[in-house]
């Protein structure tokens, strides 16, 4: 159970992440808006018409980055697709006109809010530590973050420290509100109209349904292959050995006993393989110990040392937990086989209605979805639940696989 101080600290940290990300998209929005103005001015003499497609693509790029940022912190905002190439189409497109309004808001209001939100904690750090280093400053520069007054004694230095405490209070109290104000224009203007969003959603669900059917067929083939190549062969061997033992029972009792021993070994191996196949369908450990306990079991059997960090209040749907388990199992298998890593980490968090799984390792990187390393199977499983997969694996490492799954409210 988190204390109120921990809750406020976490809210402030998340708000700061919001504000920093929003400041980045505000700078991008400012560049896009400036380029649009220059192109519009150039259109008055005809030259700007050549750059209209570039300006519209830059505008859509900036808006899509904001949509992606906001989707990570709440409900997903679906983009309208590629930007129109001609200015007439752009003027008639309601999503483009809404993006123009968003550019104007975010490049000014969003930028100012981002600067304010970042300034508060910076001032808190500066003034909160002022008594430690104010003596090192030139006398004329020994001021608070406000620029006045000039500090000449320890009483004034601790007065600046008190101002730092006030900055902390302002940052904790107003940081989350600033993040919401910065995000509000994007959530209002970058969301598609209901009819357009519905058609895109139908297309998305059609694609995810196909992915679910494909993943289901792949899983059935895997189970069939495991039963055919492993368990079935073991049971055939048991049958052959039992027949041989029955024929040898009267003429060679000692040989029959040896054959029965081999048949028992083959039966035990078949039973073990059947248990493995059953665990592959739905691991019983999920029902018994929950997601955290199941992942601890995976870490215990991993060839690479793994640190597990799970913070998931309550239980998710069985399909979500099973998918999370298989994602981690496949990812850790990849780490053991391909990465050359010395350590790996698995972090699982639930925020609102999203379950986020982050698997990282310190290996040599260069993971590729087309390289047959099981990442395609992971993506199919996640797509079947309408989730997302993000892979970051530059040559030289490290590798980070981030999976987000919807898990209900």
Image: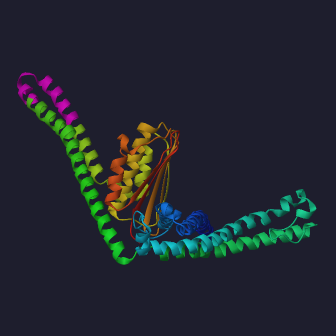
- For the point 82% across and 63% down, the residue is 130
- For the point 22% across and 50% down, the residue is 220
Horizontally, is 229 left or right of 139 in the view? left
Horizontally, is 330 left or right of 239 in the view? right
Tell me which segment is drawn in magenta. 244-266
Instruction: Tell me which corner region of the image, top left, top right, bottom left or bottom right, holds residue 282.
Output: bottom left
Q: Main secondary structure of the magenta part?
A: helix
The quadrant of the image that shows the C terminus is bottom left
Q: Is 179 rendered above or below residue 234?
A: below
The quadrant of the image that shows the N terminus is bottom right
- For the point 50% across and 61% down, the residue is 51
- Estimate the x, y position of residue 90 in percent, counting from the top left: 43, 70
361 or 107, nearer to the observer:
107
Q: How is the image coloured?
A: rainbow
81 or 302, nearer to the observer:
81
Horizontally, is 345 left or right of 169 in the view? left
Instruction: Tell me which corner region of the image, top left, top right, bottom left or bottom right, holds residue 32.
Output: bottom right
Q: Is residue 219 visible?
A: yes
10 or 94, nearer to the observer:
94
**Residue 301 part of the magenta segment:** no
- Estimate the x, y position of residue 53 in percent, counting from the top left: 46, 62
Instruction: Tell me which corner region of the image, top left, top right, bottom left or bottom right, holds residue 127.
Output: bottom right
Q: Is 297 rendered above or below residue 351?
A: above
Horizontally, is 22 left or right of 98 in the view? right
- Estimate the x, y position of residue 87 in percent, counting from the top left: 44, 68
- Estimate the x, y position of residue 118 in percent, counting from the top left: 67, 66
């Amino acid at each position: 159970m988190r204390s109120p101080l921990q809750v406020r600290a976490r809210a402030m940290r998340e708000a700061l992440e919001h504000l920093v990300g929003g400041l980045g998209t505000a700078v991008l929005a400012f560049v896009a808006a400036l380029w649009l103005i220059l192109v519009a001015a150039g259109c008055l003499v005809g030259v700007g018409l050549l750059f209209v497609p570039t300006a519209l693509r830059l505008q859509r790029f900036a808006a899509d980055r904001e949509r992606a940022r906001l989707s990570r912190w709440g409900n997903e905002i679906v983009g309208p697709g590629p930007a129109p190439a001609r200015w007439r189409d752009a003027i008639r497109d309601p999503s483009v006109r809404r993006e123009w309004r968003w550019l104007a808001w975010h490049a000014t209001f969003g930028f100012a809010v981002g600067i304010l939100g970042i300034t508060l904690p910076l001032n808190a750090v500066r003034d909160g530590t002022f008594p430690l280093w104010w003596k090192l400053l030139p006398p004329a520069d020994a001021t608070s973050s406000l620029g006045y007054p000039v500090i000449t004694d320890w009483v004034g230095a601790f007065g600046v420290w008190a101002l730092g405490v006030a900055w902390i209070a302002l940052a904790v109290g107003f940081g989350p509100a600033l993040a919401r104000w910065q995000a509000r224009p994007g959530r209002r203007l970058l969301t598609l109209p209901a009819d357009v969003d519905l058609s895109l959603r139908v297309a998305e669900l059609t694609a995810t349904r196909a992915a679910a059917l494909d993943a289901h067929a792949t899983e059935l083939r895997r189970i069939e292959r495991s039963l055919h190549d492993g368990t079935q062969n073991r049971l055939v061997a048991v049958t052959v050995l039992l027949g041989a033992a029955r024929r040898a029972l009267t003429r060679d009792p000692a040989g029959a006993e040896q054959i029965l021993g081999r048949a028992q070994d083959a039966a035990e191996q078949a039973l073990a393989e059947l248990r493995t196949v059953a665990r592959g369908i739905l691991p019983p450990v999920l029902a018994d110990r929950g997601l955290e306990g199941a992942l601890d079991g995976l870490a215990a059997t991993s060839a690479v040392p793994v640190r597990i960090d799970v913070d998931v209040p309550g239980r998710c749907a069985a399909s979500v937990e099973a998918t999370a388990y298989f994602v981690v199992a496949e990812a850790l298998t990849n780490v053991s086989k391909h990465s050359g890593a010395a350590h790996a980490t698995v972090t699982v968090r639930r925020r609102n209605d999203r379950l986020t799984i982050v698997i990282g390792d310190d290996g040599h990187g260069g993971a590729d979805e087309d390289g047959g390393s099981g990442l395609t199977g992971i993506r199919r499983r996640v797509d079947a639940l309408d989730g997302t997969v993000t892979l970051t694996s530059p040559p030289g490492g490290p590798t980070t696989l981030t999976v987000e799954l919807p898990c209900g409210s």
